Amino acid sequence: MNQKELKELIEFIIEKGIAEFELERGDVKVRIKRTSDAPTVAYPDTRYVAVPSLVPVPASPSPAASETAATAAAAQPEPEESLHIVRSPIVGTFYEAPSPGAPPFVKVGDTLEVGQVLCIVEAMKLMNEIECDVAGELVKKLVSNGQPIEYGQELFTVRPAK
């Protein structure tokens, strides 16, 4: 079973709402168990009530105050553009290079193409190449070499090409 087949199987299980699935084909055994997708909702604490401020506010700000406000506005980061997240399709160990001592498949700032290999995830002694599913620029690598990763874990952020 290759990575594409596994990904299609997972998508089918999610689409059909199957909670538990097991498949045995030759020497490959796959078991998928899902938990509830229901989001946890945090309700506001109703024990506290907003109280209006009793401190008087000047009608026109002083030059120093307006300068401080301008500095604070400049210090706030601009809203981040929409970035594409590449997630792990399987559980395993993340490797950034094809072999120890070899250069990594990609580095931050690289221009990526659809289908380009980003990394390898080792699962059950199989090396699965993870490919980029969008063209663009690699903005950030979110995991380190040799780190164990989970299904759906964020691996890379990519700024899609326009």
Image (cartoon, rainbow, N blue to C red):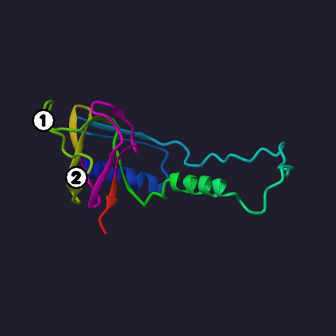
User: What residue is pinned by disc 2?
Assistant: 110
Residue at x-position 23% and y-position 38%: 96
Instruction: Specify the segment rendered in magenta.
Output: 130-157
State the image coordinates of residue 72 (x, y, percent, origin top left).
Answer: 57, 52
Q: Is residue 15 magenta?
A: no
Q: Give the foreground label among 1 and 2.
A: 2
Q: Quadrant of the N terminus?
A: top left
Q: Quadrant of residue 33?
A: top left
Dot 1: few (<14), some (14–19), or many (≥20) neighbours within 10 Å?
few
Residue at x-position 63% and y-position 58%: 66
User: What residue is pinned by disc 1?
Assistant: 102
State the image coordinates of residue 30 (x, y, percent, origin top left).
Answer: 33, 39
Left or right side of 37 for 161: left
Amino acid type for the residue under numbered disc 1: Ala
Distance of label 1 from label 2 (alpha carbons):
17 Å
Left or right side of 43 for 95: left
Q: Secondary structure at mark 2?
A: loop
Dot 2: few (<14), some (14–19), or many (≥20) neighbours within 10 Å?
few
